[in-house]
Amino acid sequence: MSLVEVGRICVKTHGRESGRKCVVVERIDKNFVLITGPPEITGVRRRRSNVDHITPTKKTIKIKASADNKEITKAISSAKLTPFMKEIDKE
C-alpha cells in the first residue's frame, strides 16, 4: 500500500502552489491523485496531481473518498490541524 491514500496530508513540490499543503481526496490511478487544499485554508484548488509532485507527511485526516471541501475543512479543524495546513514549506 502506498503512502498516498485518501486523507493523507501532503506538500506540493512542483508548480505555483509548491510548498503548500493539500489533502488527497481520491486515488485516480497509480500515477495520479485528486487533491484539494481546501482553497479557503491553503489556497490549493481541487485538481489532479501527479504523485511525483507531492510529498506525503505523517499526518492524515479521516474523510471518505471524494469528500467535498466543506467536509474536509471540518475534518481539518476537528483534528486541530488548521495552523499546520496554513504553514508554507519553503525548501
Image (tube, rainbow, N blue to C red):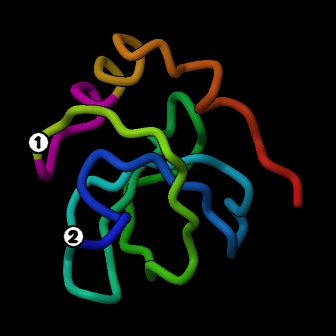
Q: Any magenta on residue 66? A: yes
Taking the spot 79% from the left edge, 48% from the top edge, the residue there is 89
Question: Within 10 Å of the Cα at label 2, are there few (<14), some (14-19), or many (20+) other Cα atoms?
Answer: some
Give amino acid for label 2.
Answer: Arg
Q: Which x, y percent locates residue 85?
A: 59, 32
**Left or right, 16 with reference to 58:** right
Q: Which x, y percent locates residue 58?
A: 50, 45
Q: Any magenta on residue 70? A: yes
In the rendered structure, which segment of residues is drawn in magenta? 65-72
Which residue was labeled with disc 2? 27
Give amino acid for label 1.
Answer: Lys
The quadrant the C terminus occupies is bottom right
State if disc 1 and disc 2 touch (CB < 8 Å): no
Query: What is the secondary structure assignment of the residue under circle 1?
Result: loop
Taking the spot 38% from the left edge, 58% from the top edge, the residue there is 35
Taking the spot 29% from the left edge, 35% from the top edge, the residue there is 69
Q: Is residue 20 above or below residue 86?
A: below
Q: Observer-nearest residue: 33 or 17?
A: 33
Q: Which x, y percent locates residue 5?
A: 27, 60
Question: Within 10 Å of the Cα at label 1, are there few (<14), some (14-19), or many (20+) other Cα atoms?
Answer: few
Taking the spot 20% from the left edge, 77% from the top edge, the residue there is 28
Which residue was labeled with disc 1? 64
Query: What is the secondary structure assignment of the residue under circle 2?
Result: strand
Q: Which x, y percent locates residue 76?
A: 39, 23
Q: Observer-nearest residue: 61 or 74?
A: 61
Task: Name the disc covering residue 73, or none.
Answer: none
**Left or right, 32 with reference to 43:** left
Could you tell me how far apart the alpha carbons at marks 2 and 1 are, in whole angstroms?
A: 12 Å
In primary-sequence order, the first of circles 2 and 1 is 2
Q: Is residue 51 above or below residue 68?
A: below
